[in-house]
């Protein structure tokens, strides 16, 4: 039996909810301020529609995050340089870290909301697993990072949403400054040839 397609009104409602949630998270001071009632009102749907479509606030946040992440997934899977599969691994890893940072900057409160949901470790979340696995596979193409699961975790720590939020709000760092600092840091990590780090003594 062929899979049933969602009704047109259900598709419209889902798109309206995601667009409304996107606007509310982009315009809020803190992500916890955005409630399901706020999203329902902004989308022009009942709260029951939200809970039917997304189960709870965490489910809605995850769905919105995945929707916004899809262009990066596509670029990595079959796009051109610098994220696409034909890019040299060093350039590609640096481009991925830059893409993650830009994503967190463009969707800062959404990313904060997602990283703040639930009581489980953020490192077990599906979105983090995808970022980590993708970066780890790129790093494994560099001989000195073969099998280095830790390196991917360490580099991703530099683009956590709470750190990005702190640097933007408290340290007043600009987008250009953050991108330049991250690129310089990641390049040092990926090109340092000493076995114990850049400051190790002989």
Image: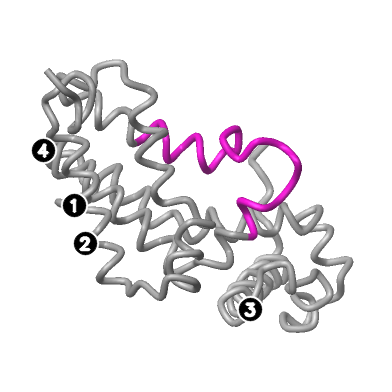
Mark 3 vs mark 1: which is more N-terminal? Answer: 3
Residue range of the region highlighted in magenta in the rendering: 113-134
| Mark closer to the chain start, 3 or 2 | 3
| Residue hosting label 2 | 180
Q: CA distance from mark 3 to mark 2?
A: 26 Å
Q: Residues within 10 Å of mark 1 (few under 14, many from 20)?
A: few
Mark 3–mark 1 contact, CB under 8 Å? no
Alpha carbon separation for disc pair 3 and 4: 40 Å
Q: Is residue 103 magenta?
A: no
Q: Quadrant of residue 98?
A: bottom left
Label 4 crowding class (10 Å Cα cut-off): few <14, some 14-19, many 20+? some
Instruction: Assess disc 3: are there few (<14), some (14-19) or many (≥20) residues with their C-alpha within 10 Å of its C-alpha.
Output: few
Residue closest to the far right: 48
What is the number of the mark on residue 29?
Answer: 3
Gap in angstroms between the C-alphas marked 3 and 1: 30 Å
Tag 4's secondary structure?
loop
Q: Residue at position x 63%, y 78% from top?
A: 29
The residue that appears at 59% across and 79% down in the rendered structure is 23
Is tag 4's residue or tag 2's residue first in the polypeptide sequence? 4
The residue tagged 1 is: 184
Which quadrant, please, contains the C terminus?
Answer: top left
Q: Position of residue 172 (x, y in %)?
A: 41, 75
Please indicate whether residue 130 sits to the left or right of residue 34 in the image.
left
Q: Secondary structure at mark 3?
A: loop
Q: Quadrant of residue 49?
A: bottom right
Nearer mark to the viewer, of 4 and 1:
1
Residue at 36% across / 35% down in the picture?
Answer: 134
The answer to whether marks 1 and 2 mark residues whose Cβ atoms lie closer than 8 Å is: yes
Q: Residue 88 shows which numbered tag?
A: 4
């Amino acid at each position: 039996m062929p899979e049933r397609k969602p009704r047109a009104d259900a598709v419209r409602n889902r798109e309206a909810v995601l667009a409304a949630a996107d606007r509310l998270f982009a315009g809020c001071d803190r992500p916890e301020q955005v409630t399901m009632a706020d999203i329902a009102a902004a989308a022009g749907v009942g709260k029951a529609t939200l809970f039917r479509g997304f189960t709870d606030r965490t489910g809605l946040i995850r769905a919105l995050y995945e929707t916004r992440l899809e262009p990066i997934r596509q670029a990595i899977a079959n796009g051109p340089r610098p994220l696409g599969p034909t890019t040299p691994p060093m350039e590609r890893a640096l481009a991925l870290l830059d893409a993650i940072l830009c994503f967190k900057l463009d969707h800062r409160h959404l990313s904060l909301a997602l990283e703040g949901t639930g009581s489980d470790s953020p490192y077990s979340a599906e979105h983090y697993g995808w970022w980590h696995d993708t970066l780890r596979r790129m790093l494994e193409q560099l001989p000195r990072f073969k099998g280095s699961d830790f390196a991917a975790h360490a580099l991703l720590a530099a683009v956590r949403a709470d750190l990005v939020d702190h640097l933007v709000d408290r340290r007043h760092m600009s987008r250009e400054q953050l991108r330049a600092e991250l690129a310089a840091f990641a390049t040092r990590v990926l090109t340092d040839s000493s076995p114990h780090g850049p400051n190790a003594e002989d």
